[in-house]
């Protein structure tokens, strides 16, 4: 795994510099374009069907370029780059195939179901099989920060406009489908009044993207202010200036605020946990605990005060409320969060995520433990509801079934598929930690720390929504992982 010999075969014995440049420009384009994709494409003067298919062009470009690189390597006899994730990914795909065969799942429906899981894994393997320099990696990260800052700004402007630009930012509706599968925008059927979503097309997409942005900014700020890189010349330049720290702090506070204003509760909780975790990481020494506590309280109080001022907090002294999943209702940010502790929320949760966590796993283990019900989503839901022995709390439908993503994976691919996916995440976390400890390069240090945190946050988020299937989130998840392995392998080569 990540041996210098393997890296040398991959990076030094090839002459595909044009493909390297082309791949780099494609990656840079995707980094900038994907968060604005739905907003940009809606202005195309084309039919509804063409608009629908236009969303697949960026994804298709990854497949084509990766196929070209594979062919080139096979022709020239260049070995493929091996990563610690190869084995669990291959085994998972094998389990998915076996599950489809055993359960006699529809081929097209199975491909439709597995595609969101693997589409940006292809990007991961594209990245690790090309030559990405530290300069290019720095540029990619910088453009990601530009995009995140732009989304942050748009979100704040949207909030301050009090709904004036909501319709302008909404995506274009489409009823076109492929094999019964369509692109549904929950936003178009109504969200809570006042929630923001930038140009991402949905509040959940916006909040999860901003969570990634928060992790990267805090990681960069943490690395820039720690004397941990003794041999990196780029680090020895005084990069931890007061101006950069102030700007990073503004981005962090602003990001927490817009995440809260998205009304996505789990991302608000994640943001608080992220700030607490990094604060404790920075001020782990006993003599600095007091400073750490002050920073933590400041990090939490500033965005909270900002939110309370803007939502007329003093008009809400009747205790926490929960408005359910009703759309287009007036609800404060505080009520949206504190409402989850009410009896009404608990009763509703028993028919939703809580019910899925308690009822579906037992039903799967009793009836289809090893390979699950198959990757055909509609057939899986039907067979799950019709199971001879059931522990279900309700009759499940397609809508909301995959919100508890770990449960959905177990339903599709059984304990075997779920265990393999958990194994994949564990290996990613473990290697991110190893690389973070070993590397002496600032950029790799930032990326590996970000990947470590992103992996943990993703595992947490997958109990509440299908985060890893979101185009925006999945793109950056696999992008950062690919950059981490690629850059570290080159560092090992040069130091050997």
Image: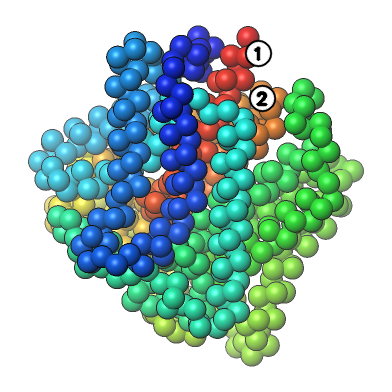
**Residue 341: image x %, image y %?**
53, 71
In the rendered structure, find residue 495 and report the number of the disc placed on it: 1
Residue 352: give its label: none
Secondary structure beneath disc 1? Answer: helix
Colouring scheme, one of rainbow, by chain, secondary structure, one colour: rainbow
Residue for badge 2: 439
Residue 120: in sight, yes or no?
Answer: yes
- Between residue 193 and residue 201, name the one nearer to us: 201
Q: Residue at x 82, y 53 (%)?
A: 243
Q: Work out whether 97 lies above or below 323.
A: above
Q: Within 10 Å of the Cα at label 2, are there few (<14), some (14-19), or many (20+) other Cα atoms? A: many
Residue 485 x, y percent position in the rendering: 52, 27
- Residue 126 in the image: above or below residue 491: below
The vertical placement of 144 against 236, above or below, is: below
How many angstroms separate mark 1 from mark 2 (CA)? 11 Å
Where is residue 399 shown, x and y percent of the image? Answer: 28, 64
For the point 66% across and 75% down, the residue is: 307
Front-most of residues 57 and 2: 57
Q: Is residue 446 left or right of residue 20?
A: right
In the picture, which quadrant includes the C terminus?
top right
Q: Quadrant of residue 370?
A: top left
């Amino acid at each position: 795994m990540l041996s210098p010999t393997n890296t040398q075969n991959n990076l030094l014995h090839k002459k595909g510099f044009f493909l390297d440049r082309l791949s780099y420009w494609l990656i840079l384009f995707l980094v900038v374009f994907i968060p604005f994709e739905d907003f940009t494409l809606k202005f195309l003067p084309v039919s509804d069907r063409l608009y629908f298919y236009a969303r697949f062009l960026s994804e298709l470009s990854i497949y084509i370029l990766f196929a070209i690189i594979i062919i080139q390597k096979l022709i020239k006899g260049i070995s493929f780059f091996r990563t610690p994730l190869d084995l669990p990914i291959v085994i998972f795909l094998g389990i998915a195939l076996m599950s489809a065969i055993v359960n006699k799942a529809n081929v097209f429906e199975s491909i439709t179901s597995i595609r969101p899981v693997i589409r940006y894994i292809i990007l991961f393997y594209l990245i690790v099989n090309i030559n990405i320099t530290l300069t290019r990696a720095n540029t990619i990260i910088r453009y990601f920060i530009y995009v995140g800052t732009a989304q942050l700004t748009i979100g704040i402007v949207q909030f301050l406009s009090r709904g004036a630009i909501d319709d302008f930012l909404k995506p274009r509706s489409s009823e076109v489908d492929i094999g019964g599968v369509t692109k549904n925008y929950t936003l178009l059927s109504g969200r809570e009044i006042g929630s923001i979503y930038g140009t991402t097309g949905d509040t959940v997409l916006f909040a999860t993207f901003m969570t990634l942005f928060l992790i990267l900014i805090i990681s960069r700020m943490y690395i820039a202010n720690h004397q941990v890189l003794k041999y990196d010349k780029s680090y020895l330049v005084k990069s931890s200036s007061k101006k950069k720290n102030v700007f990073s702090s503004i981005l962090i506070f602003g990001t927490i605020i817009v995440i809260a204003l998205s009304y996505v509760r789990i991302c608000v909780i994640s943001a608080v946990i992220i700030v607490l975790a990094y604060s404790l990481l920075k001020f782990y020494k006993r003599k600095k605990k007091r400073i750490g506590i002050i920073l933590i309280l400041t990090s939490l109080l500033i965005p909270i005060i900002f939110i309370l001022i803007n939502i007329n907090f003093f008009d809400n002294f009747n205790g926490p409320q929960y408005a359910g999943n009703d759309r287009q209702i007036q609800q404060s940010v505080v009520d949206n969060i504190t409402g989850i502790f009410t009896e009404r929320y608990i009763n509703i949760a028993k028919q939703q995520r809580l019910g899925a966590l308690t009822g579906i796993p037992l039903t799967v283990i009793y009836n289809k433990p090893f390979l699950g019900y198959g990757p055909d989503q509609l057939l899986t839901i039907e067979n799950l509801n019709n199971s001879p022995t059931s522990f279900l709390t309700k009759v499940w439908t397609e809508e909301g079934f995959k919100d508890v993503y770990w449960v959905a994976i177990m339903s599709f691919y059984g304990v075997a598929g779920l265990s393999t996916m958990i194994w994949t995440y564990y290996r990613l976390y473990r290697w991110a930690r190893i690389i973070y400890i070993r590397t002496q390069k600032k950029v790799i240090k930032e990326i590996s720390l970000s990947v470590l945190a992103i992996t943990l946050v993703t595992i947490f988020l997958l109990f509440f929504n299908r985060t890893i299937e979101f185009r925006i989130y999945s793109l950056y998840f696999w992008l950062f992982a690919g950059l981490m392995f690629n850059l570290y392998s080159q560092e090992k080569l040069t130091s050997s």
